[in-house]
Image (cartoon, rainbow, N blue to C red):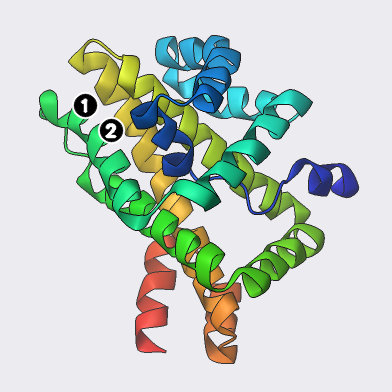
């Protein structure tokens, strides 16, 4: 089972904003991705609470993983920090139209994606090594991380198609919950990549995002 989980992870996989950047550029690759995932996105739009289940299905789909790999390669070549901010601003605008407060989750996702992009462009070897070790040593956690990213991607794409405030609020609730999980991953990866022994001890014992954040501030 663990070996199967590890093989499912394409480290490092694209983050939500790297995938969604295609929504701005209308690239052929993004349109292909969107067309392939349309049934999953429509299901998530109708039942936001089913997003994680749909993400798990996609992560067992070879064609989807191939599209993710291609999107990742495209992101490495074309996405800048300004473009990431522009992408999140575009999606965030959908929620602002209906006066839905989702600023904190959006900032958490943007922080994760900006940090990841900086590592890919400036610290690639160490970054990939860390993710490979993560997938091999903690395959269940690595799989959960991939599910979290994929679920957020589905929810954000679905939000672009939502027509009512009620639907957007339901999507926002799911995004808020997952953003907390993503922040824990971000703080963990930062601590591990920096190689700080004290911080690594904190990561290993922290029971929540808030506990980890406070503990790292002290260290």
Residue situated in front as seen by the camera: 36 or 4: 36
State how far apart marks 1 and 2 are (Cα): 6 Å
Please give left or right for residue 1 compared with residue 47 in the image.
right
The N terminus sits in image quarter:
top right
- Point out residue 195 in the picture as x, y percentages from the top left corner: 59, 85
Q: Residue at x 47, y 68 (%)?
A: 187
- Point out residue 22 in the picture as x, y percentages from the top left corner: 43, 31
Q: Which residue is drawn at 69% across and 53% down?
A: 11
- Point out residue 72 in the picture as x, y percentages from the top left corner: 59, 44
- Point out residue 53 in the picture as x, y percentages from the top left corner: 61, 25
Residue situated in front as seen by the camera: 89 or 149: 89
For disc 1, the neighbor class at 10 Å (few under 14, some 14 to 19, many from 20) is some
* Residue 208 seen in the current view: no
Q: Name the residue under label 1.
A: 94
Q: Name the residue under label 2.
A: 91
Q: Residue at x 25, y 24 (%)?
A: 169
Element assignment for label 1: helix
- The quarter of the picture where residue 100 lies is top left
Marks 1,2: beta carbons within 8 A: yes
Please give left or right for residue 109 compared with residue 34 in the image.
left
Q: Residue at x 34, y 41 (%)?
A: 176
Element assignment for label 2: helix
Note whether 210 is above or below 145 in the view shown: below
The C terminus sits in image quarter:
bottom left
């Amino acid at each position: 089972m663990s070996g199967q989980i590890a093989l499912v992870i394409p480290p490092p996989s694209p983050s939500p904003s790297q995938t969604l950047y295609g929504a701005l550029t209308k690239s052929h690759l993004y349109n292909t991705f969107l067309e392939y995932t349309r049934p999953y996105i429509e299901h998530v739009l109708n039942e936001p609470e089913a997003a994680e289940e749909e993400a798990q299905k996609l992560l067992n789909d070879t064609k989807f993983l191939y599209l993710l790999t291609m999107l990742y390669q495209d992101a490495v070549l074309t996405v800048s920090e300004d473009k990431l901010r522009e992408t999140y601003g575009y999606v965030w605008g959908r929620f602002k139209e209906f006066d839905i407060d989702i600023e904190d989750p959006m900032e958490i996702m943007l922080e994760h994606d900006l940090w990841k992009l900086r590592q890919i462009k400036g610290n690639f070897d160490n970054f990939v090594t860390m993710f490979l070790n993560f997938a091999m040593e903690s395959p269940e956690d690595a799989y959960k991380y991939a599910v979290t990213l994929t679920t957020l991607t589905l929810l954000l794409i679905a939000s672009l198609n939502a027509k009512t405030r009620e639907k957007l609020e339901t999507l926002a609730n799911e995004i808020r919950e997952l953003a907390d999980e993503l922040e824990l991953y971000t703080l963990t990866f930062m601590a591990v990549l920096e190689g700080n022994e004290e911080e690594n001890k904190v990561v290993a014992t922290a029971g929540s995002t808030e506990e980890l954040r406070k503990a790292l501030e002290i260290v």
